[in-house]
Image (spheres, rainbow, N blue to C red):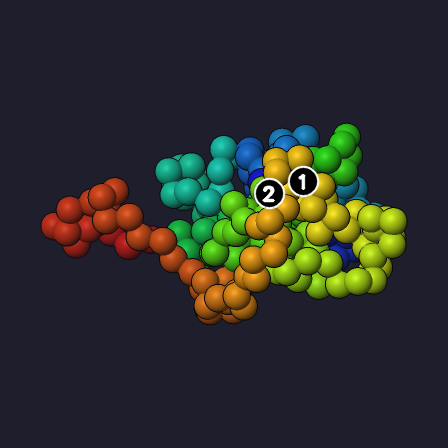
């Protein structure tokens, strides 16, 4: 899932300085799961902003709403008829949600209330860890299902750097050396011979380094005549 964390209250207040009536908009999927932008967080933040701005003598009117997903038109389109009442939207969605709102409602000021951090999972209660960098060329079949791109501090593709000690990363001793984890798992599956195969340099053109990425599934696209008649966001 996409993991994010709420920006400091002071930073959010600064972004809202020039706006009087604001819609605090949450997202019901990833950022709800990581307790950053769901209905509960929207309520707490809106209440905090009301009190803080009132104490500052620059009181704001904060309305609250949470949609199922900010990144899909069908869930944000119903907001359109209400947006004329607001000076800005404070999005508690990820960066994709913020940009989806901007594309759909280009005349509306949309502000980010979260810092989008990484693609990860909850490793324990209250802890989220990065597991994927969405590099566009998955090699998990070669590394026993453990990603060295996201989890090795040096993104090494052909074994550990030599600086790890007792199975811990030399960059951060709190982290397990991912190549130790890969070795142990490949050993369990009798795949150690695969570690002797040298992986070629990664094709970074499939990652963000190659520019904004796009996937097109022609079998799922609408007919051309429908696309031409469809109004643009």
Secondary structure of the residue carrying numbered label 2 = loop
| Residue 137 seen in render | yes
Instruction: Please state, as top left, top right, bottom left or bottom right, where the N terminus lies in the image.
Output: top right
Marks 1 and 2 sit apart, C-alpha to C-alpha, by 6 Å
Tell me which corner region of the image, top left, top right, bottom left or bottom right, holds residue 158: bottom right
| Residue 110 seen in render | no
User: What is the count of numbered marks?
Assistant: 2
Q: Residue at x 61, y 36 (%)?
A: 189
Label 1 neighbourhood size at 10 Å, few (<14), some (14-19), many (20+)? some
Residue 17 rendering spot, x and y as whole percentages: 69, 59
Left or right side of 183 for 24: left
Secondary structure of the residue carrying numbered label 1 = helix
Residue toward you, 90 or 34 = 34
Residue 196 rendering spot, x and y as whole percentages: 61, 56
176 shown above or below 203: above
Label disc, if present, on residue 187 of the rendered structure:
1
Residue toward you, 167 or 79 = 167
Label disc, if present, on residue 191 of the rendered structure:
2
Residue 37 rendering spot, x and y as whole percentages: 64, 39
Q: Residue at x 73, y 35 (%)?
A: 123
Q: Residue at x 64, y 42 (%)?
A: 186
Q: Residue at x 60, y 49 (%)?
A: 193
Question: Looking at the image, do the residues carrying marks 1 and 2 touch, with CB atoms under 8 Å apart?
Answer: yes
């Amino acid at each position: 899932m996409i993991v994010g964390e709420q920006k400091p209250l002071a930073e959010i207040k600064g972004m809202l300085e020039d706006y009087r009536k604001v819609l605090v908009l949450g997202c019901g999927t990833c950022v709800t799961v990581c307790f950053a932008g769901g209905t509960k967080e929207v309520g707490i933040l809106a209440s905090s902003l009301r009190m803080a701005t009132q104490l500052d003598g620059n009181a704001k009117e904060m309305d609250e709403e949470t949609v199922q997903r900010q990144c899909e038109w069908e869930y944000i389109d119903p907001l359109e008829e209400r947006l004329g009442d607001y000076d800005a939207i404070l999005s508690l969605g990820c960066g994709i949600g913020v940009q989806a709102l901007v594309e759909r409602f280009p005349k509306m000021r949309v502000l980010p209330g979260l810092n989008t951090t990484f693609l990860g999972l909850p490793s324990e209660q209250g802890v989220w860890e990065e597991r994927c960098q969405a590099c566009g060329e998955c090699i998990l079949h070669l590394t026993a299902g453990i990603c060295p791109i996201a989890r090795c501090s040096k993104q090494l593709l052909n074994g550990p750097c030599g600086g790890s000690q007792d199975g811990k990363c030399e960059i951060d001793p709190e982290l397990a050396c991912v190549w130790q984890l890969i070795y142990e798992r490949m050993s369990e599956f009798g795949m150690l011979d695969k570690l002797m195969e040298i992986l070629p340099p990664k094709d970074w053109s499939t990652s963000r380094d190659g520019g904004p990425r796009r996937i097109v599934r022609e079998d799922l696209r609408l007919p051309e005549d429908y696309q031409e008649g469809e109004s643009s966001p």
